[in-house]
Image: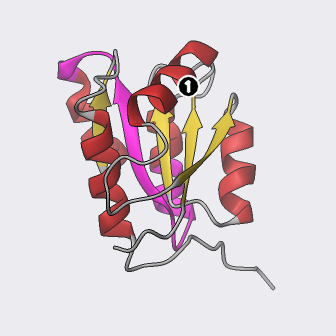
Amino acid sequence: MSDAPATVLVYSSRPEVREAVRTAVGRRPAPDVGPLTWIECATGEDVVDTVDGGGVDLCVLDGEAQPTGGLALSRQMVVEVADRPAICVLIARQPDRWLAHWSQADGTLALPVDPLVAPQVVAGLLRERAGRGPSRRPVSR
């Protein structure tokens, strides 16, 4: 992967969770990744609209968000978006990993967000995504 900029969408109904993710990951999670541009979304509708617009490389979705959880949004994107961004879901409890598996997310981060783990997970997902290019939603005719 080059030093090409990447766009990361972070979704949570709680602003403190969005802030924790941005702070833990930072602007450049690894020397070969970034710099990152952050897009914050507070509602599931905002996530869908933003992803529909294209150009998002990674979505970090809060599984505990209300009223639309990140796990449901992950599953929705897997089914509906042909060239979707990479997806990482935030889970509050380790036993919830099965839900992350059900959602078909590409990765998980535990809450509270660990600043030593989060950059590694984000960088890894962005490296995997680099070969596919930014997401684009097909135009229906």
Residue 21 x/y as whole percent: 46, 28
Q: Is residue 138 visible?
A: yes
Inspect the magenta stretch and tell me whether residue 120 lies in it.
Answer: no
**Residue type of the residue flagged with mark 1:** Arg
How many labels, in total? Answer: 1
- Quadrant placement of the C terminus: bottom right
Please report the residue visible at 31 percent of the width from the left and 52 percent of the height from the top.
30
In front: 110, or 29? 29
Above-or-below relation of 92 to 48: above
Residue 46 x/y as whole percent: 74, 41
- In-image side of 63 versus 124 (left or right): right
Q: What is the crowding at mark 1: few (fewer than 14 residues within 10 Å), some, or many (at least 20)?
A: many
Residue 122 x/y as whole percent: 35, 47
- In-image side of 125 versus 83 (left or right): left
Tag 1 secondary structure: helix
Above-or-below relation of 106 to 112: below
| Quadrant housing residue 66 | top right
- Quadrant placement of the N terminus: bottom left
Residue matched to label 1: 18
Magenta residues, as a range? 75-95
Q: Is residue 105 visible?
A: no
